[in-house]
């Protein structure tokens, strides 16, 4: 399963690394690709990764999820 996460608040490559690390740490996430310019992260994951878990992981590092597709 693939998900695209729109994230508000990323400003630099350090932000990208923090988002990558937070999403990679979630159980069931296989691959993460963060695009700073577009303000999105794309993940490949199994169906067990809940949107609420993604939102919480991103909020815990100081950013806001505005949408998950």
Image: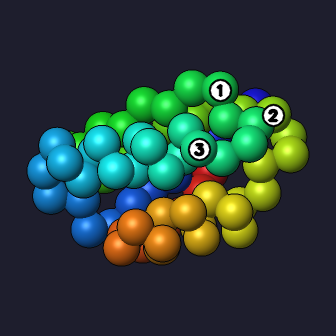
- How far apart are labels 2 and 1 at the CA level? 8 Å
Q: Is residue 38 visible?
A: no
Q: Nearer the viewer, mark 1 or mark 3?
A: 3
Residue 51 position within the rendered picture, expressed as x and y whole percent measured from the top left: 71, 61
Q: Nearer the viewer, mark 3 or mark 2?
A: 3
Residue 58 position within the rendered picture, expressed as x and y whole percent measured from the top left: 48, 64
Which badge, 2 or 1, comes first in the chain's sequence? Answer: 1
Residue at horizontal 16 percent and vertical 43 percent from the top: 13
Q: Are marks 1 and 3 in contact (CB under 8 Å)?
A: no
Q: Quadrant of the N terminus?
A: top right
Query: Could you tell whether 17 is left or right of 13 in the image?
Result: right
- How far apart are labels 3 and 2 at the CA level? 14 Å
- How far apart are labels 1 and 3 at the CA level? 10 Å
What kind of element bears circle 1?
A: strand
**Label 3, on which residue?**
25
- The image shows residue 61, relative to residue 42, as above or below, that is below
- The image shows residue 51, relative to residue 14, as above or below, that is below
**Dot 1 surroundings within 10 Å: few (below 14), some, or many (20 or more)?**
some
Which badge, 1 or 3, comes first in the chain's sequence? Answer: 3
Residue 64 position within the rendered picture, expressed as x and y whole percent measured from the top left: 42, 72
Query: Could you tell whether 2 is left or right of 60 in the image?
Result: right
Residue at horizontal 66 percent and vertical 47 percent from the top: 26
**Label 1, on which residue?**
30
**Label 2, on which residue?**
46
Q: Are marks 3 and 2 in contact (CB under 8 Å)?
A: no
Residue at horizontal 30 percent and vertical 42 percent from the top: 17
Q: Are marks 2 and 1 in contact (CB under 8 Å)?
A: yes
Residue at horizontal 39 percent and vertical 60 percent from the top: 7
């Amino acid at each position: 399963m693939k998900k695209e996460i729109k994230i508000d608040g990323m400003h630099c490559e350090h932000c990208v690394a923090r988002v990558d690390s937070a999403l990679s740490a979630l159980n069931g996430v296989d691959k993460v690709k963060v695009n700073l310019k577009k303000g999105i992260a794309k993940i490949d994951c199994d169906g067990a990764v809940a949107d609420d878990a993604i939102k919480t992981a991103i909020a815990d590092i100081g950013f806001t999820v505005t949408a998950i597709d």
